[in-house]
Image (spheres, helix red, strand yellow):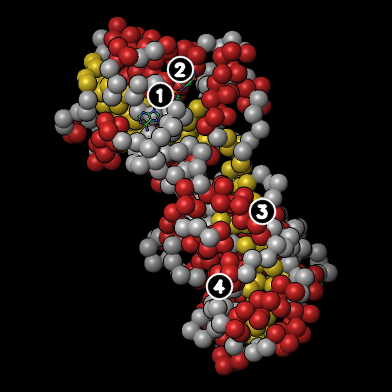
Amino acid sequence: MTIVTQDLPEALYRAAQVRAMDRYAIDTLGIPGWVLMQRAGAAAFQVLCQHWPEARRIAVLCGGGNNGGDGYVVARQALDHGIEATVFALSPPDGLQGDARRAFEAYREAGGRVEAGLPAEREDFDVAVDALLGTGLDREVGGRYADAIGWLQAFAGGVLAVDVPSGLNADSGAVMGCAVRADATVTFIGLKCGLFTGEGPACSGAVWYADLAVPQAVLESQPPTAQLWRRYRNLLPPRRATAHKGHFGHVLVVGGDAGFTGAVRMAAEAAARVGAGLVTVATRASHAAYLNVNRPEIMCHGVETPTELQTLLGRATVVAVGPGLGQSGWARSLLQACCDSGLPMIADADALNLLAQNPKLRENWILTPHPGEAARLLGTTAAEIQQDRFAALAAITAKYGGICVLKGAGTLVGGDGQLAGVCALGNPGMASGGMGDVLTGTLAGLVAQKLPLLQAARMGVCLHAAAADAAAEEGQRGMLAGDLMPWLRRLVNA
Ligand SMILES: NC(=O)C1=CN([C@@H]2O[C@H](COP(=O)(O)OP(=O)(O)OC[C@H]3O[C@@H](n4cnc5c(N)ncnc54)[C@H](O)[C@@H]3O)[C@@H](O)[C@H]2O)[C@@H](O)CC1
Ligand SMILES: [K+]
């Protein structure tokens, strides 16, 4: 029995790996491809019924490969269940081969209607099924397929994508020219990496997984490429009754040039809210005195020279550098002192921009670029970074060492030789000023509490996103970075 679930496994694969799993199931284990296609179509139909129980008329847009074959099975299932289905064939069915052809013939024998081209009226259908292109996508989409994707983009009813939203690169989450934006995607045998990062989350909608009842050996025939993180997990141990503040580390936040004091203030508060024992800010002397007026628990020092910073570095467990730092000579000299200190470091914002100008290889740090900063770190463009976020992550850790957190929808976390993690938590309400500063402080607060860097990055990224999801219950629009603070506190105690 094929299981269709939203309780997704952790392992993520590239399209070629899932295709290899298909071949292993078919060629080595002798499970006919036709049987897999029947299960895939049945799983997609099951999701369609669950999402749109009222659907009475469906349009199924079928491409010329096996993804289209799955579409014919969905259409056939619909007919069997008294739902009116019409297939719109992007490639002449006469040209279909193998299992896809057989699926077409079975549908025709059941009395199914096939039309060439696209439906004239969108209003005739409640739900449209995207069975245009799946893991076989190997080039930019143009011509008829682009027209069909355009048709689906303008369709007001529900859209269900079969295996992968057509046009989405299943490996990178980049759009290959244009891509379907589905309400739900049902994906088969192995979860594809691209569904969860870059444009993937926007194109896939709710992701469902169907294992097509293949034996575990099929899933184990390929090593995962990345790991999906869908839940926040608290990795901090419970506090002992005899605990004192010295047990939970001392975070030093460095930055906050004139006009950017909020950035250090938020990073510092986040570090305190996730449980750091002590938090100190080193900032411009001109505003050091009033930075902690409303948060007197944070210590604050005016620092104009690297020598003045040395004393503070000497007391710190971890340094978070970059929020509001700017790129002046002051900024440069403080960053250098932080790097020389040997302390574990979180580098964000202008610290990254300065590093891009003067790259350093260091193991003991977490870099937290957004795509624009990642582009500067690698001397490329943000668009190039988004074309392949996994490759960008690997390139940054190869060039700079340590752990990289590549921010943006489907935040990636990785270190050299480590399986990349993809955070599926978070929401578009996080697109507002100060969110990055809160993440920087969160990570520093966890490192201060002695979590190894990779664990701190994993926990911190998921914690920050989970706090944002909780805060967004009152609305994504207008959500402030500061709104995360009470949730950070609740979640580190969960
Ligand atoms: N037996 C199997 O291998 C199974 C495959 N399944 C389905 O089969 C799909 C893979 O099938 P295919 O390998 O036939 O590939 P697709 O159906 O994804 O693609 C079909 C054809 O589209 C062409 N194409 C690629 N990029 C294009 C573009 N930009 N514009 C226009 N045409 C383009 C390719 O040349 C390819 O021949 C999976 O995504 C899944 O839906 C499932 O039925 C499960 C079992
Ligand atoms: K598809």
Residue picked out by circle 4: 350
Distance CA(mark 1)–CA(mark 3): 37 Å
Quarter holding residue 474: bottom left
Residue labelled 3 has its Cβ within 8 Å of some atom of ligand 1? no
Label 2 vs label 1: CA separation? 9 Å
Say which mark, if any, is on residue 37: 2
> Does the closest atom of ligand 1 sit within 8 Å of the Cβ of label 1?
yes
Instruction: Indicate which disc, 4 or 3, sits on the residue closer to the N terminus.
Output: 4
Q: Is residue 380 above or below residue 147?
A: below
The vertical placement of 175 against 23, above or below, is below
Give left or right: position of 291 versus 89.
right
Residue type at tag 4: Asp
Residue 323: image quadrant is: bottom right
Comparing labels 2 and 1, the label whose residue is closer to the camera: 1
Say which mark, if any, is on residue 67: 1
The answer to whether the residues at label 1 and label 3 have Cβ atoms under 8 Å apart is no
| Residue 234 rendering spot, x and y as whole percentages | 67, 54
Q: Position of residue 97 (x, y in %)?
A: 39, 12
Residue mark closest to the camera, 4 vs 3: 3
Disc 3 or disc 2, which is closer to the eye? Answer: 3
The type of residue carrying mark 3 is: Ala
Dot 1 amino acid type? Asn
